[in-house]
Amino acid sequence: MESNGGVASDISGLTGNDNFFEDFQIGEVYEHARGKTVGEIDNVLITNLVMNTAQGHFNEHQMAATELGHRITFGGVTTALVIGLAMEDTGENAVAELALDKIRFRTPVLHGDTLYAFSEVLDKGDFDARAAGRPDLAHWRDVGEVRFRHWGLNQRDETVFEGERRVLIKRRAFKTPATAGGKAARPVAARKPAPKEAPAPRAAKVAARARAVKKPAARKPRR
C-alpha cells in the first residue's frame, strides 16, 4: 500500500516474517513461487489505457504477416508482471520504491506465455535521504536500502526481462514516524449515531409536499 510520493503507509498485517532488511544477504538468489500466464486482456487493456499506439500490441491482422505471427506483449506489462511476482518476497516490508533501471527485454512475450520471476540481492546498506536526492524520505528511521536484480523466464526457460530495482525496506526495529519516540496514536472515540427523527404521519407528509409544489399559473381560455 502506498501513499503520496510512492511512500508506503503503515502496514501491520504482512504475510511474511523473513523479508525485513536484515534478512536479505548479498549474493542470495530467489526463485519466486508463483507464475503468471499472460492473457490477451493483460496486454491489450493496459496498452490501450496508457495510449501506447504501437500496433504490434493490439493489431493481430498486421502482426499475422510478421515473422512472429502474433501480437507481442507491451514491455510495460512484462515489467509489471515479473516484478509483481517478485514483490511477495522483496516488497512486503518496503516503505518506498527508489529506482528501476537497466531494463532489458530479451525475448518477446506472446499471449499464452507463462512467466516466472527470479531475484538476486546485489547490494544493501544504510539509506542517506539527502545523498539519494530524496529529502522527503528523511523522516523514515530504521530502514535500509536494498538493490535487487530481477529477471523473468517464460515456460521455455527463455529470459524475457531483466532489470535492477532499488527499494527502501524496514528493519525489524522499524516504527512509523507517527509512533516513533513512544508516542502512541490517540484512539478515536466511537461516535454515537444521531437519533432518528420520528417518522411524520403520511397525511402530514402529503400536505407538506403539496405546499412545496408551486401551482401552475391559470391558462387563458382559447378563443
Image (cartoon, rainbow, N blue to C red):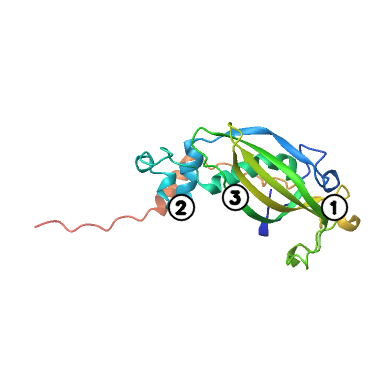
Q: Nearer the viewer, mark 2 or mark 3?
A: 3
Above or below 38: residue 148: below
Amino acid bearing label 2: Asn
Quick one: which residue is furthest to the front in this view? 67
**Image point 47% across, 42% down: which residue?**
72
Is 123 left, or right, of 69 in this rendering?
A: right
Front-most of residues 79 and 14: 79
Q: Are marks 2 and 3 in contact (CB under 8 Å)?
A: no
Q: Nearer the viewer, mark 2 or mark 1?
A: 2
Residue 151: % across, % down: 65, 43
Q: Which mark is residue 52?
A: 2
Which residue lies under the disc numbered 1? 175
Front-most of residues 220 and 194: 194
**Image point 80% across, 62% down: which residue?**
139
Quick one: which residue is furthest to the left in this view? 223
Residue 24: % across, % down: 82, 45
Residue 65: % across, % down: 35, 40
